[in-house]
Amino acid sequence: MPLLASITAYALDYMCMPTFWLALIPAVLTTVYIVPYLLDPLGLRTFPGPIFAKFTSGWLPWVISQNRWSAIVDSLHRKDGIFVRLSPNHISIAHPVALPAVYGHSSGALKAPFYDAFASFKTRNMFNTLSRTEHTRKRRIESQIFSQQSVRELEGTARVHHIDLVSQWDKLYSYVKRAESGAAREGFNYWSFDTIGDLAFGDPFGMILAAKDTARSAKSVKASLETFSTSSNTEKLAFETEELPVTKIMGQRGELVAMLGWLPEYVRPIILMMPGFRSNLQAIPKVAGLAVAAVAKRMNNPDARADMLNRLLDAPGAITVANTSCATTYYLARDQRVQAKLQTELDDALKAVDSVVAPHGAIKHLPYLDAVVNEGLRLHSPVGAGLPRVVPEGGMTVLGHTFKEGTWVSVPTYHLHRDENIWGENASEFYPERWIEASGDQKKAMLDAFVPFSIGPRACIGRNLALMQLHIVLATLFHRFNVVLESDDPVRSQAYALYVAGHAAMGIEAVMLRQKEF
Ligand code: HEM
């Protein structure tokens, strides 16, 4: 007994010395990082990749925090080939044949826990649920809403926001002559959010007309949800709301969750307590508050349109459509030849149409407009990063490599969309003609690698709506306006090209509007 007591006393004394704690650091690092690397339970050690990525899942979030996710993964594939290790358990596979294997209907791979970071509530939505059963149930209900037929019927609702957008651009042209910094980009955001707000909740946020990034959000999501559960059907819902800069907040939230998703669950709360992230953390419930306030407003209005889209509380739709329209406008501004060619096609198709907004029926099959939309989605896919899936029981074999159950795999859209082997030497150029000139095998190879909406059971359900919106907004605006870059300076153009490569916000503030001569 005295021996045990003296050992304990000695150990306690030793633990009080700084040398003990210093000695502990390598021991912890070895246990947490080196041992799993050496044991290599998933058999990934031979795959190339950045050294830190092989040891820690913190490397990818760090890259994302620098806003260089897609561009870095692209450059790694260019250097190391088809397979690149992005974290201890995650392999990126840059080849079109991996698409059906990873995302296809018969793949068996489920969404990775990366999507947990997108869940604002305990109940998951169609986008962030990992469960196949829950997803199939939700998707079956909602696929009806997004069918080609239903989307056609929404054109009238969406039209009013196109008119608002045009009237704002008209104002920009006549009063300001030059768009103020950011005005054109914000215009796309406001238009897209107003349209989705109207389609989803029967009420636009009113951002285009206010020319302001603003919407009402429930101040406390918890308190407002309690109001929902305690109110009778006939009672008006009332709770405190506040004005919020919603597009800014959505941007912050997107960046944060994309970064957190790659980290183990236990690390996320620690990161969120760090000073640089605390303000982003506050953004998460605010987005939920926005949806809550919009639904309450809708429920308080018994005359609201009887649509079903209010199920899509967390749809990632508005921001993606705004990004793509904005990016395509930038490319068209940069290349006046392409813009003029598009305008010739539009002028011809719309000459007998007496409407400010291009009717979808008149423009949906225009070959050059189609090619422009595709080219915008190719070069600036709003979802360009590889979406992670977990290899199911029994493993997965891609191009001769078998991955064990539990490995995370993804296919980087950004890289596939710029691969010279598929798109030719001018892969990084905005060249809509490629969609018209390619034939036979070449066209098939392009279509096999073109996945802006992903494929398989988790592919974008809003694809038809997004394509309709993109066609209408581009046809309407380019039939009415010429858009040019403020500066032809090659150094500045280069800077914008880099922005695109980094998937950062576009440098669209450099666009100014000149009204087209009719
Ligand atoms: C240019 C516009 C758009 C692009 C490029 C796009 C792209 C995508 C992609 C790549 C996915 C797969 C995400 C993943 O696997 O993690 C997705 C899913 C989804 N998108 Fe879109 N999207 C667009 C517009 C829209 C719109 C307008 C809506 C609805 C209003 C929408 C609603 C959804 C939903 C609900 C999902 C989840 C589907 C599921 O898991 O079954 N998207 N989108």
Image (cartoon, helix red, strand yellow):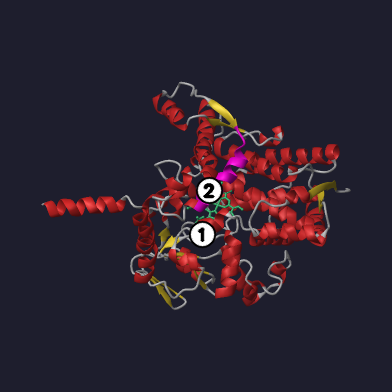
Q: Quadrant of residue 327?
A: bottom right
In front: 171, or 334?
Answer: 334
* Spatial CA span between label 2 and label 1: 13 Å
Q: Quadrant of residue 294?
A: top right
In front: 282, or 285?
Answer: 282
Percent x, y for residue 505?
A: 66, 51
Q: Residue at x 60, y 44 (%)?
A: 153
Mark number, residue 267: none
Q: Amino acid at mark 1?
A: Leu
* Residue beneath disc 2: 256
* Residue beneath disc 1: 60
Secondary element at image label 2: helix
Q: Is residue 237 left or right of residue 198?
A: left
Residue 385 among magenta residues: no
Magenta segment: 244-259
Helix, strand or loop for the magenta stretch, by majority: helix
In the depicted structure, whether residue 151 falls above or below residue 409: above
